[in-house]
């Protein structure tokens, strides 16, 4: 899930068409569906966002990241990784989540540049 500044963006649910989400499902167009926001309860959404934001902050990150969280069927969560330089194509996960809150790709890029510049100046 994307983190921008100090805000958690909507959760992205990745659903591979078969098997599990591997290299082939990630990079083969049409091999997976992406649901934004994810089909989670409000409580699950808040918990995933809190875990992702906590991981982002624990690493001292300030501008943006993408935190991969695995939510098991029993409700337990595992933070898999924090990507400090997430994909930034128009079809990458961070831009997908940002678009849901009204930040189209060019606006997202401007926001990241602005946050970066303000952190550098402070």
Image (tube, grey):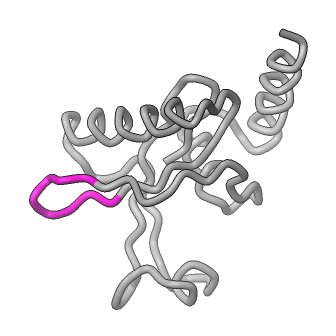
The question of residue 76 being in magenta is answered with: yes
Q: Position of residue 15 (x, y in %)?
A: 38, 72
- Tally the marks: 0
Residue extending farthest to the left is 74
**Which stretch is magenta?**
70-77
Q: Is residue 113 above or below residue 67?
A: above
The question of residue 34 being in magenta is answered with: no
Q: Position of residue 59 (x, y in %)?
A: 56, 37
Q: Position of residue 56 (x, y in %)?
A: 53, 37
Relative to the observer, which residue lies in front, 9 or 34?
9
> Which of the 4 quarters of the picture holds residue 107?
top right
Q: Main secondary structure of the magenta part?
A: loop
Q: What residue do we see at 83% from left, 9% from top?
A: 122
Q: Is residue 63 above or below residue 24?
A: above
Q: Is residue 10 above or below residue 69?
A: above
Q: Position of residue 57 (x, y in %)?
A: 52, 30
> Which of the 4 quarters of the picture holds residue 21?
bottom left
Q: Is residue 21 above or below residue 39?
A: below
Q: What residue do we see at 84% from left, 23% from top?
A: 114
Q: What residue do we see at 72% from left, 52% from top?
A: 85
């Amino acid at each position: 899930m994307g983190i921008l500044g100090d805000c958690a963006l909507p959760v992205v649910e990745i659903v591979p068409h078969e098997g599990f989400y591997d290299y082939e499902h990630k990079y083969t167009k049409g091999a997976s569906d992406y649901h934004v926001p994810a089909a989670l309860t409000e409580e699950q959404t808040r918990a995933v966002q809190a875990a992702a934001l906590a991981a982002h902050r624990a690493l001292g990150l300030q501008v943006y990241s993408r935190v991969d969280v695995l939510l098991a069927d029993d409700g337990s969560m595992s933070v898999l990784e924090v990507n400090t330089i997430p994909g930034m194509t128009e079809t990458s996960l961070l831009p997908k989540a940002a678009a849901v809150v009204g930040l189209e790709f060019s606006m997202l890029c401007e926001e990241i540049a602005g946050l970066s510049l303000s952190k550098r100046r402070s």
